[in-house]
Image (spheres, rainbow, N blue to C red):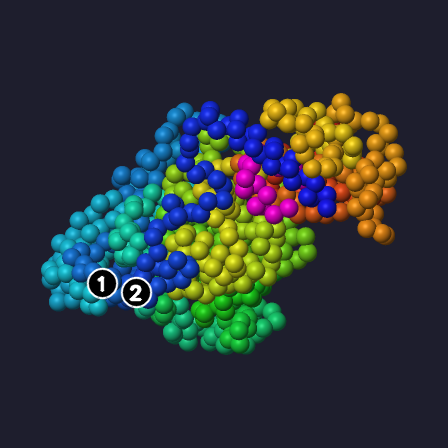
Amino acid sequence: MTRNYLVPIVLLFASVVLAQDSAAKQGHPNNNKFKQLYEEFATPNTFRTASGAPGVDYYQQKVDYKMNITLDDENTKLYGEETITYTNNSPDALPYLWIQLDQNIRNENDMETAKNPSGAPMLTSPERFIADYTGEKFVGGFNIEEVKDSNGTPLKYTINKTMMRVDLPTPIQSGGQYSFSIKWWYKINNHVTDRARSGYEYFAEDDNRAYVIAQFFPRLAVYNDVEGWQNYQFWGNGEFALNFGDYEVNITVPSDHVMEATGSLQNPKEVLSRTEYQRYKTALNSFDDPVMIVTQDEVIEKEKTKSTKTNTWRFVAENVRDFGFATSRRFIWDMMSVNVGGKNIIASSLYPKEGNPLWEEYSTRVVAHTLEVYSKYTFDYPYPKAVSVHAKNQGMEYPMICWNYGRPNPDGTYSDRVKYGMISVIIHEVGHNYFPMIVNSDERQWGWMDEGLDTFMQYLTEQEFQPNYPSRRGDPAKIVRYMSGDQDFISPIMSNPENVYQLGPNAYGKPATALNILRETIMGKDLFDFAFKTYSQRWMFKHPTPEDFFRTMEDASAVDLDWFWRGWFYSTDVVDIGVKEVKRFYVSPNPSKEVNERLASFGMTLEDLNPSVFMVGEDDEAFDPSLAEGNLEDHSDLLKEGLAEGKKLPKYFYQIEFEKPGGIVMPIIVEYSYADGTKERVTYPVQVWRKNDDSVKKLVTSDKELIGVTIDPDAETADVDLTNNAWPKKEADTDFDKFKTKVQG
């Protein structure tokens, strides 16, 4: 009944607004935050569907490698020969092949340094200053000795920085195969001083090195339906775009070295001592605790001498996109098994004695925990093993193997920061087996697709490792500082890794936080988890794009998320929702001043309206203090006559106006507090902003007096300004107050 009485006034107000605005403003394109992402997305086709799934014509190339690798420990050089078999599954004939030469980033052109400006350093350490300006510059890069076809005939090739084009005698036709070989060598860098992904760490006290070797062989670039050849140069930040294939790799190293690598070890009995081999077999069926295959005491003895003999370790890997290995006589080795989906998986760790006691206690157990949790949310881990290798200041990933930091003090003591930092980086790098080693996104173009998704999964895994785990990323409150920073130094998530100022927050922290908010606040865990698992399983062992992810998350959940992707991934907007005003209204027999003015503008009077119910605020001249006393029906004969027997109208009417200074639209999560001590939590859907991007009003009715309004009470939306989140407005603590609280705490 009340709604009918109000209709004429609502229509009247709308007519006046339209009449006032129609003549003045010019037209504009559709800038609504809820419009679909059709302009940003590629048109669906038979390769990639509108649902986010691979299409009927989806294809990907297959590249197989057979390699013989020799490590020259004395001269820190690596020599290699490879035979590559390229299978062209595309519909196109390929007259040439593009090959990645990532080691060339360290050749005389020094691409990684040359790409950045270099002014005078205002602040640096003495050690860094001396190293930068007095040290001999390392010059590395591939030395290509030959490129030949399967008959031994030389092939023409052209090197362009970190890319090499091999020209073929005749194009590889669709469905065809082509085999050729490359012979090369390069000088291995010190990854500690060079801050590189691959190389060695030198231990002066015993004149030994620990090697973590990757990007060590010429690798085929990706050719796909999205852009043809992905031959973007390797500048250092953007990582890798790679093909799946099968590997047979023989690696020759000093005989006292211990090694782990991508793939299954084919000859453990040949390269291990009798005792080590027995321990190795025991570890294959040890599910409770790791088995020490090479102990710390045994390593200390090996460090005293250097063998002049060699061993060749043989590894085979199927359906992997890359290959890495680690080798040293200084490595302690432990191993256990973990059951994932009914299959026994090897979890193991390599580490020098400098990593103990921390690594012996945690590393392999963390590997096993990571495989269990990631598999629960995505797919059962398909590879036979996962290895964590200790490397100072490192965190880097390859199929089945990764490098991780976390080194105790020389006396073996360590802080919680070192401990949790190590656990977190192991979770993160082992987790990369899922993204991008299996869900094989293009890291060189879209760093967030592996780093952001992996950091999100890392957060879930950390929280399941122990209650209240001190996660660095994932909690919405921890991204606020970055998002509210200087916009001149912030890029959208949808940016190439080479073009962002703050890669960590941009590619790791913000997308992980966005997905956490999507799961916890927007979609709910059930819908999100189903959609995320659908994406993971659709694209395992395939090459997804960002659009494939966005589309699948919507397709599998029936939640329209274009507004979310636009705000969080395509812009640098922030979340900021506040309480602009709270007004109490009263039922009145007389209209407010605003109603009278609008009636007059149309030449109308009250007599021109049907019998109506009016509401006025305390600041309106029509307000009568007596309205605040008694029941509502006492002030309106219409209400008294129309009220059904036994029914009672609310005592209090409050109009809450919410504002949105921030650009990102989000649901309004609000907690109402009442005078009787009770609280009510209400979530208004994000669509509440669809017709007004600045502010919205909500009427709250109750029999209890409203005394407080709080937006986002659990800090779950990454709101960058909490000073406008409450009514009555709370006074913000001064910096001194915050300091006192910290000291007292």
Q: Which residue is depicted at the point 65% across and 40% down?
A: 7
Q: Which numbered marker is on residue 495? A: none
Q: Quadrant of residue 161?
A: top left
| Circle 2: residue type | Asp
Q: Which residue is depicted at the point 55% across and 58% down?
A: 528
Spot occupied by residue 125 in the image (x, y as percentages of width and height) = 49, 31
Of 590 and 59, the residue lying toward us: 590
The residue that mark 1 highlights is 91
Of 683 and 61, the residue lying toward us: 683
Residue 677 seen from this side: yes
Q: Residues within 10 Å of mark 2 (few under 14, many from 20)?
A: few
Callouts 1 and 2 close, C-beta under 8 Å: yes
Q: For numbered disc 2, what is the local secondary structure? A: loop
Relative placement, left or right, of 383 versus 46 is right
Of callouts 1 and 2, the N-terminal one: 2
Q: Which numbered marker is on residue 57? A: 2
